[in-house]
Image: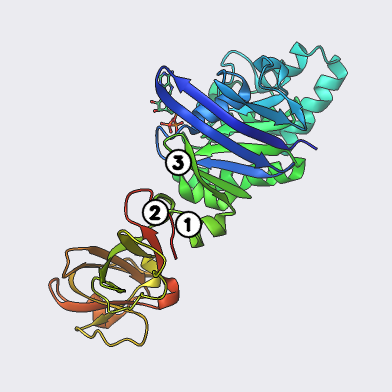
Amino acid sequence: MSSVEITALRKLYGDVVALSDINISIPSGSFYTLLGPSGCGKTTLLRTIAGFHRQDAGSIEVAGSPIEDLPAYRRDVGMVFQDYAIFPHLSVRDNVAFGLRQRKVASAEIARRVEAVLKTVQLSQFIDRMPHELSGGQQQRVGLARAIVIEPKVLLMDEPLSNLDAKLRVDLRAELRRIQRELGITTIYVTHDQEEALAMSDTVCVMHGGVIQQASSPLEIYMEPANRFVASFVGANNFLAVTRTGASAALASGGVDLSGELAGTSGDVVAAVRPEALRVTAGRDEADAGGLAVPARLREVSFVGREMEVFGTTEGGEELKAVARPDPAIVDLHPGSEVTFRAPRSDLLFFEAGASGRRVA
Ligand SMILES: Nc1ncnc2c1ncn2[C@@H]1O[C@H](COP(=O)(O)OP(=O)(O)OP(=O)(O)O)[C@@H](O)[C@H]1O
């Protein structure tokens, strides 16, 4: 059982707070992804767990034992890097055997383990090739084989797919997940690619400015974002201002009365709605029982085959995007036409205004 428990972890570079009070609990065998924009601290967190950086405060436990004071080579973690980091002058066999030789494993045992792990990553036929005779995807599999052959308690991966082309990235995503499941190895994975994070992970931990914004299942991150940052970083969202007059609150345009939902809040609030939750109808018609109905001017319709993307601007100047099944009545409209964007009340989420505004309803 190799669970990972990180408590009150803090890391500074001079006066830059790269990690601020990080608390993470990862169950044994699960796939945990750190997701966030450039500079959010995800690489720093991964490298601090690996032992390449020293934390300023806090603790890291693997399988119940503290590791934060151990040197990197004694932490029993495997690491896979973005740039593969395999030795160019060693064959596939020798690259994978490297860590085992360092650990003074007997040569018959090394041969057995190298062959087994190359089978797992589907590189058996390449065992005697040199790295330059392999494709990028194959080189990354060597990197993975090298990390897992030592049977580490935890596997750390730093953007392992980002140097590969799009198609290969998607194939290798599934492949990585299969291998991770097969081995049952606790994995911490860093990416800035939200689709990759959602597709692969048991838990997605969204970071911003050295702070964890939300750590939940992919579905919950998408459906129930904890704050406005998560709602705008993961998937697309439209944001609409909510106005208040006296005791009542309503969407600036759209006609929904929100007095009930927002009774306990003060300050500015925005409503969020996913593009795929919006429908578009031709003409201006705000009558919609209980749901959102926002009049807008059509900016552009882009018919992309399976779906259409509809862009509009509300009277208040807010930009809206809907993604819906192609509808000839909309696809054929001219830019500037009046349309109405609609959504059921149940598809609206509400956040305090401000980039990281908390979810309020
Ligand atoms: N060696 C360093 N010295 C000073 N500041 C650093 C150093 N390394 C990182 N930082 C800063 O710490 C913060 C977190 O950096 P980090 O590399 O962990 O982010 P990241 O989320 O992995 O970004 P990216 O996706 O671009 O790699 C950033 O503000 C960065 O500028």
Please name whichever residue, 106 or 111, is drawn nearer the observer in this view of the structure. Answer: 106
**Tag 3 or tag 2, which sits nearer the N-term?**
3
Quadrant position of ligand 1: top left
Report the residue marked by disc 2.
Answer: 228
Residue placed under numbered mark 3 in the picture = 36
Q: Report which residue position mark 1 lands on.
A: 225
Q: Please indicate whether residue 283 sits to the left or right of residue 44 in the image.
A: left
Image position of 238 (left or right of 77)? left
Locate the C terminus and report the quarter of the image it occupies. Answer: bottom left
Residue type at the position of mark 2: Arg
Callout 3: SS: loop
Q: Looking at the picture, how far across and down is residue 176, in whole percent?
A: 63, 42
Spatial CA distance of label 2 from label 3 is: 14 Å
Q: Is residue 148 above or below residue 179?
A: above
Q: Distance between the residues labelled 3 and 1?
A: 14 Å
The colour scheme used to paint the residues is rainbow
Residue 81 figure quarter: top right
Name the front one of labels 2 and 3: 2
> Do the CB atoms of the residues marked 2 and 1 lie less than 8 Å apart?
yes
Disc 2 element = helix
* Amino acid tagged 1: Pro
